[in-house]
Image (cartoon, rainbow, N blue to C red):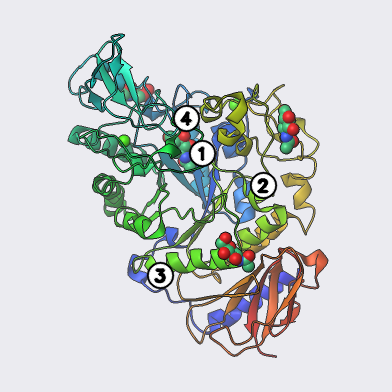
Amino acid sequence: MATKVLSLLLLFCVANGSRIPRKDSQSDTWFRHTNVYQIYPRSFKDSDNDGVGDIRGIESKLDYFVDLNIETIWLSPIFKSPMADFGYDISNYTDIDPIFGTMDDFKSLLQTAHGKGLKIVLDFVPNHSSNEHDWFQRSIKKEDPYTDYYVWVDPKGYDENGQPIPPSNWVSFFRYSMWEFNQEREQFYLHQFLKEQPDLNYKNPAVVKEMQDVLKFWLDLGVDGFRFDAVATIWEDDRYLDEPESGNPAAIDENDWLYYDHIYTYNLPETRDVLGKLHQTIKEQAEIDGYPRVTMLEVYLEVEEEMKYYECSDFPFNFAMISDDPLNATIVKTIIDDWMKYMPEGKTANWVLGNHDRSRLGSRVGSDMADALNLLSLTLPGVAVTYYGEELGMTNTNISYEDTVDPSGCNCGPDHYQECSRDPARTPMQWSADENNAGFTNADKPWLPINPNYPEINVATEKMNQFSHWSIYKLINDYRNSELILSDGLLRTFVVSNVLAFSRSINEVFPTFVTVVNFNNEPITVDLYGQFHTALDMGLIMASTKIQETNHAPGEFVDVRSIHLAPHEGLLFWLVSL
Ligand SMILES: *[C@@H]1O[C@H](CO)[C@@H](O)[C@H](O)[C@H]1NC(C)=O
Ligand SMILES: *[C@@H]1O[C@H](CO)[C@@H](O)[C@H](O)[C@H]1NC(C)=O
Ligand SMILES: *[C@@H]1O[C@H](CO)[C@@H](O)[C@H](O)[C@H]1NC(C)=O
Ligand SMILES: CC(=O)N[C@H]1CO[C@H](CO)[C@@H](O)[C@@H]1O
Ligand SMILES: [Ca+2]
Ligand SMILES: [Ca+2]
């Protein structure tokens, strides 16, 4: 294939200029330039036909990642759980839930993955356990040492009906009070999420130690790192003062999290002290066996505030491109520039386009724009994070109220569930057009319905079409894997007529490549000459998301003074001289 020849040629010219030097080779580690793929295990592949995806299912599909040149797989929680929040309510942090398989299944997955050069990152949910966790059950009974493992507070008083009054007006993420009264202990406990998810008390050093032991358990088994869930909620102000109203018009009513400004419950500075201790446990493992693991954090903040979380992790996820606000070239340029400007020296950037809490990329920006944004994230410096199915152009699935299972959706009721439910972005992976349930399961009914677009949007069909979402994604990842896509070096971003472009090179003398994304709904011709850090004026095309509408086949040339772009086209080329 032309592209193979092309990349060999380019490899040769880079090799000629000696191996690509890295900015800080001392601390260089695999996760500075890896790509991360998030699997939502319930929906990836079902091996035993009960309608729910599982660990053996994932193991059976590992070659999919080898094929796509994806290195790191992050699994949403697979731990023992009553599934009130589908695994984000953990009743035993060191055990596998039977719905997903056994500990032996997990060990086998890990071993097979490592044998194929893949990494497995686990989801770590530090803020809360399940209410069915043994610690919580003993805490209710005030059995030491568990008495203060959770946040227990006396009622503020009792109302005229003798009902206990909660300590404060705090409202949880999933609506209604953050406080739940426990009859047995006659105190309220705190829950930032569901009442089935009591918050752990990080003011208690025994809890910190307990969670360090959990990390150690999995590190000793050989996992490659962790993604920490919901970290901004770890610490609360223990004066339990009421939070002020936010005035946010998006709030449904006063029971909605958005109704308040969470000044006493979200992103408190002590949070980072706790995280620092947990991160330290992960780093120490490298001192034992010489192999560095990754710590990635889930935290949604303004960029400058978010940067503080680099102190206590390898990187906090960059969610700036995941919002429901429309994106355009100027906005995305600002997102990129801000992250690169504020990121601490020597750290790694990252770009997240989707997850199991948000509307799917293809539904937010349109399927063709999704390809262009995948190109963007895969060619920016640092780590690209892909949510399962977004390499196929999967979109949200319309789900009726009757079929809704997400507690966040159910709590909003039949009139508002579509604003709150996360089910539409969690439906089964679409493997093929002609097997049962798109090749996900042979059960009569999968746990969530299959998207009706599966006959076109699926792995098998897209593999056979060189212009499909999947084929474009793979081509770009193949370049990434050839080390031509750099984690460090020069980056210049610019915008011309709502077209975003950026150039990348290790330094002035190394080859420069350029990514261009047309955010316009119309075709446009742009002149990008003079914007790069070199005077070269021809582009040798590596990839385009719109080959069928343009003449931008890999190996063709383009004059940078006059680049004709299709609507929503993403284009990748090397700067060359002829
Ligand atoms: C978690 O599960 C493991 C394996 O079954 C068991 O040995 C351990 O005691 C459990 N821990 C708790 C806190 O229930
Ligand atoms: C989604 O499904 C509901 C009922 O199941 C239907 O009323 C609604 O029109 C559908 N919406 C879309 C966008 O298809
Ligand atoms: C991009 O979005 C911003 C913010 O909504 C807006 O001010 C700007 O005019 C938009 N630019 C284009 C070219 O649409
Ligand atoms: C993106 C993400 O991981 N969201 C999770 C945050 O934490 C809550 C509670 O554990 C989950 O419900 C979300 O899915
Ligand atoms: Ca199963
Ligand atoms: Ca908390």
Picture coordinates of residue 4 (x, y %)?
A: 70, 70
Q: First in sequence: mark 1 or mark 3?
A: 1
The quarter in which the N terminus is drawn is: bottom right
Picture coordinates of residue 566 (x, y %)?
A: 76, 68
- Which circle marks residue 341 in the picture? 3
* C-alpha span from label 2 to label 3: 30 Å
Kindly identify the residue that appears in the image at 54 percent across and 79 percent down.
Answer: 15
* C-alpha span from label 2 to label 4: 25 Å
Residue 77 can be seen in this image: no
As displayed, is residue 520 above or below residue 193? Answer: below
Q: First in sequence: mark 3 or mark 4?
A: 4
Element assignment for label 3: helix
- Which circle marks residue 87 in the picture? 4
Residue 5 picture quarter: bottom right
**Mark 4: few/some/many CA within 10 Å (<14, 14-19, 20+):** many
**Residue picked out by circle 1:** 109
